[in-house]
Amino acid sequence: MYPIVVFFLLLSNWIVFSGKFDAFHLGLGVVSSLFITWISQDFLFHDRSKTWEERMREAGAFLQYIPWLIVEIIKANLHVFKLAMSRTGYEEVAPRIVTIKTYLKTDFAKFVFANSITLTPGTITMLIRGDVFHVHTMSQFLEDDLLEGAIERKVAEVFEPDVLKRKKRKR
């Protein structure tokens, strides 16, 4: 069942993003989708214990996460612009490597967290070892924003709401 779902998800993305509906391009999409399904089906649905309802909740939560992430990316863009274009910004540039211990448990949640950090201008996830992330930041502002944990909380809300509830209870 899962490989079929993965295949149709990939094929529908191919069709939407290619915008080509002739036999050659559709055939290429089918071949590509079959190949990618074959090599990556375990990654896309590694946790097969989740129900269809849980997966749909995750998809809905992720769709709500995307606009929030876009706003964070815009704010970081404005900060990096300030760093590059003003004298005070230039003085504020202080590159550093920050170590973050995450409470996220699943590989996919960690993957989304790492990519969300890297998509945010001025920060790059350099290395992940278990629960420890090493992130390069350009300034104290970006470091403080990262250590505040908003991205991690949002990712946990989408992919690991139970872990987030346990963490809140421990406080």
Image: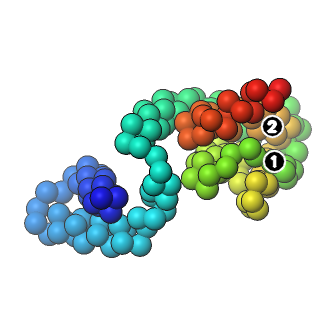
Q: Is residue 168 above or below residue 15?
A: above
Identify the amino acid type marked 1: Ile
Contact (Cβ within 8 Å) of mark 2 with mark 1 = yes
**In x, y percent, where is residue 66?**
50, 35
> Which residue is pictured at 34% across the width and 58% down the height?
2
> Which residue is pictured at 79% across the width and 54% down the height?
132
Q: Nearer the viewer, residue 118 or 59?
A: 59
Residue bearing mark 1: 100
Left or right of residue 122, residue 101 in this image? right
Q: Kindly state the secondary structure of the residue where label 2 is placed.
A: helix
Q: Which quadrant of the figure has residue 142?
A: top right
Q: Nearer the viewer, residue 100 or 121?
A: 100
The chosen color scheme is: rainbow
Left or right of residue 166, residue 143 in this image? right
Q: Quadrant of the N terminus?
A: bottom left
Q: Earlier in the sequence, mark 2 or mark 1?
A: 1
Q: Which mark is residue 147?
A: 2
**In x, y percent, where is residue 83?**
77, 37
